[in-house]
Amino acid sequence: MSSNHPLDQLYRQVIMDHYKNPRNRGVLEGTNVDINMNNPTCGDRIHLTMKVEDGKIADVKFEGEGCSISMSSASMMTQAIKGKNVEEALRLAHIFSDMIQGKEYDDSLDLGDIEALQGVSKFPARIKCATLAWKALEKGLHDH
């Protein structure tokens, strides 16, 4: 990635904004999905809490520690899935996984800020950072 490409700059700004001002940070009380995951290779960890009601993600929050990529990804994910039904959220997780691995992905959905992370696919060591929150989402919804 060229560091002076305007889109790269914009994506970096979006990532840093989510890192410095995370959306949906905290722990929900009275949840029916509560998952802890970590990435032992780098120390990133996430605690994801969700209220799933009538097949819909009514609310979601996260807490954790980690690099800007993992925490930004968690912030973006919570924004993207809140209010979605479980199937939509899992489809979004699949699309994100394909995008982050540099595979062809369904771009018919508006990914919003999540698209800022697509450059991570060029840095294989950072893919696990970006996918940690999404793996927690998938595990939490499948276990639910």
Image (cartoon, grey):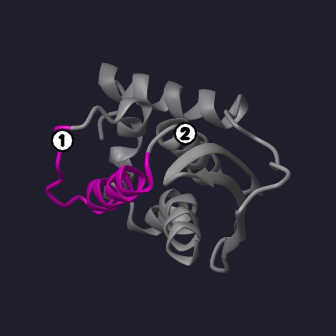
Look at mark 2 in the image and give the residue it sits on: 82
Pointer 2 local density, CA inside 10 Å: few below 14, some 14–19, many at least 20: many
Q: CA distance from mark 1 to mark 2?
A: 20 Å
Q: Compared with residue 21, is residue 47 higher up or lower down, i.e. above or below?
A: below
Residue at x 85% of width, y 51% of height:
29
Nearer to us in this view, 57 or 93: 57
Magenta stretch: dominant secondary structure: helix
The disc labelled 1 sits on which kind of residue? Answer: Asp
Does residue 51 appear left or right of residue 54 in this picture? right
Residue at x 60% of width, y 51% of height:
53
Mark drawn on residue 107: 1
Pointer 1 local density, CA inside 10 Å: few below 14, some 14–19, many at least 20: few
The disc labelled 2 sits on which kind of residue? Answer: Lys
Does residue 42 belong to the magenta stretch?
Answer: no
* Percent position of residue 112, x then y: 38, 30
Q: Compared with residue 61, is residue 22 higher up or lower down, i.e. above or below?
A: above
Residue at x 68% of width, y 73% of height:
38
Does residue 4 appear left or right of residue 127 in this picture? left
SS label for mark 2: loop
Q: Compared with residue 42, is residue 74 higher up or lower down, i.e. above or below?
A: above
Q: Quadrant of residue 47?
A: bottom right
Nearer to us in this view, 51 or 26: 51
Residue furthest to the right: 29
Magenta-tinted stretch: 85-108
Q: Are marks 1 and 2 in contact (CB under 8 Å)?
A: no
SS label for mark 1: loop
Mark drawn on residue 8: none
Answer with mark 1 or mark 2, whichever residue precedes in sequence.
Answer: 2
Q: How many marks?
A: 2
* Percent position of residue 32, x then y: 71, 62
Q: Compared with residue 64, is residue 58 higher up or lower down, i.e. above or below?
A: above
Does residue 86 belong to the magenta stretch?
Answer: yes
